[in-house]
Amino acid sequence: MVMRAFGKTVLRTMKRNATRLLAVTAIITLGICFVCGLGVLGPKIRSTFDAQLRAHDVVDVIVKAKSESGLSDTLIDELATLDCVENTQPLTMLEIEDEETAERFYFMPVADMPFNRLQLLEGDFPTEAGQCVVERASDTVHSHSIGDVRTLSVDTPIGTQTFEFTVTGIVANPLFFTRNGDSSLQNKKPLSSIAYTTLESFRDISPIAAMLANNLPVTDLYVRVTDAQKQSVFSDGYAATVSKAVERMQAVSDEPAYLTLEENKSTAFLDAITEKIDVITMLFPIFFILVTALVVLTTMTRLVEEERAAIGCCRTLGYSEARIAFKYLLYALLCCCVSIIVGNAIGAYLLPSVICPAFNIVFFLPPLTGAPNLSLGLISSAAMLVAVLSVTGYAVHHSLNEKPAMLLKPKAPKPGKKIFLEHIPLLWKHMAFKYKSMFRNVFRYVGRLLMVVVSVAGSTALMLAGFGLHNVANIGSMVISGIVVEGIGDSIRPIAAVIIVFAALLCILVVYNLTNMDISERRREVATLKVLGYNDLEVCGYVYRETLLMAFFGILLGLPLGAGILRFVFYLLDFGSMLDVQWYSYLLSAAIELIAIVCVDLLLYPKIRKEDMNTSLKAVE
């Protein structure tokens, strides 16, 4: 019977504070969605490309000859017999450079590669003399069509000989998946063409071609490392396995160069970009968790204060402190459980589907893998749950320390005292009453002031950080294997946009929650103003001026805080500087925050207008 009555009080309180609890749930959901959504980006992109590379059995090590004579048959045989080597494939690569660009020709079993297989996108593989396939077009590699003719000029003892190859197909080499293209090995000139043909197709062109084909040196030896395929290309375990294999091969001969996927431009660029995304996703969740914990602390503290009489009755009836505390911890737990489920679901599936297509600007993006990595989302969910329950427990503990007799009495209002502006007579005497009242209310309730200021400052800082990243994204580049690669900004730009949107949503939800509670707690005050003849707009102005003033303080604090965050982010990302952040980013951050607050005020206007004066004046506070 007692438990049934207590259960009814739990449900009544939940129903009476449904709007408040929904707002808290929305804020927690927003934070988890943001953290989970950004947290899955790096792992999802890596797993997507890893699946693509594994589907075509990408090469693990390329043994490259440093001399024109190429790799000897003896060395090739010795490397192939090592137990760390699963398979090998010799081939020849020629590069022809002009003043500005370079062309590359591969001689290999195009359609029958045992690994690092070419993906045929269009047409057919070479089957006759003088045929080839070409790499798909990118920023540097020119576009070719089936039927086009590619020429190869080779210096011979009887002079330069030119051979023609007809393009029969368009292919994708698993080693090349950046739209920025690639460069020649010697002088780092951009490659304008990459062609693949077989020795038979070259040999059958003419007797001279046959002579040259029989004497082409083996310039490259593709090596597949034992057990490396069982691990992700981007994992530390894969790197360690390949590194050990390279050490074994170097022990056989240190004359050639041993190149791993870490030296391959495409994989190195992808790994570098996703590492920088991981940095961003590890830093920003901290601010969301802090702001969310602060809002929950405010909400639960005010909820407990409103329930003083109910808590006093429960204490008088013999309910234990643990059972009373459980009531409010249950509210927080329900909010968190709903938020964790919804936030992780939206963050893991919706945000990646919105952001990942932007990587198509930089990479040839294959279909995304279906399984998201929820590790960061679950970690942030656990952190959010601990933070919310901790601040709720703190808020309840503060009230439970009071004696039941004191809890049954209305809480005494905070004693009035002069604020610092009243000590400036020249300013205070010429100030209108409505502004005097505003400043008194703002500075009288320091706790409320700090909550609004810190919350708005946090969302402003996040927004400025988002705009700063967007500014830097317009000029972002990085050096991969000695090549300046453009495009990192194209990958970070959508992330910056997400940060801006979520910061604005955070501001709206936080200010809505705090302002809604403020209006609910000041019902008698609002009703008194109406009785005194204030119209709805004047009453709204009386309440909203305080919110705008506190928000203004929050914006002033948030802008330098955001600049500090940006400095730290640029330091971790190792690109960009505060000089790259445009002046209008500061103005936009402040303007969007103010617009968000105005939107909240408009949403809450009906609540003030519909406030019943008689009911409010009869209420005991």
Image (spheres, rainbow, N blue to C red):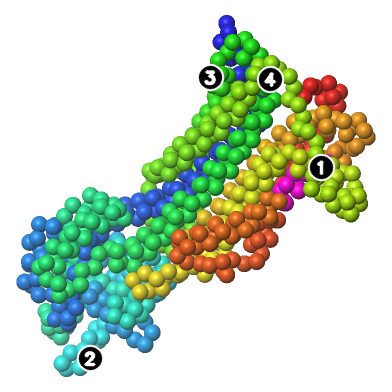
Q: Is residue 495 above or below residue 37?
A: below
Q: Residue at x 64, y 35 (%)?
A: 298
| Three-letter residue code for mark 2 | Thr
Classify mark 2: residues with Cα within 10 Å, few (<14), some (14-19) or many (20+). Answer: few
* Disc 1 to disc 3, C-alpha distance: 40 Å
| Three-letter residue code for mark 4 | Leu
Contact flag, marks 1 and 3 (Cβ < 8 Å): no
Classify mark 4: residues with Cα within 10 Å, few (<14), some (14-19) or many (20+). Answer: many
Badge 1 or badge 3: first in the primary sequence = 3
> Can see residue 419?
yes
- Please state which of the two labelled residues, at mark 1 or mark 2, is closer to the viewer: 1
Write down the residue under mark 1.
Answer: 418
Q: Position of residue 283 (x, y in %)?
A: 48, 52
Write down the residue under mark 2.
Answer: 160
- Please state which of the two labelled residues, at mark 3 or mark 2, is closer to the viewer: 3
* Disc 4 to disc 3, C-alpha distance: 17 Å
* Span of residues in magenta: 541-552
Write down the residue under mark 4.
Answer: 407
Classify mark 1: helix, strand or loop.
loop
Please identify the dominant SS of the magenta region. Answer: helix
The stretch drawn in magenta includes residue 234: no
Q: Position of residue 115 (x, y in %)?
A: 21, 60
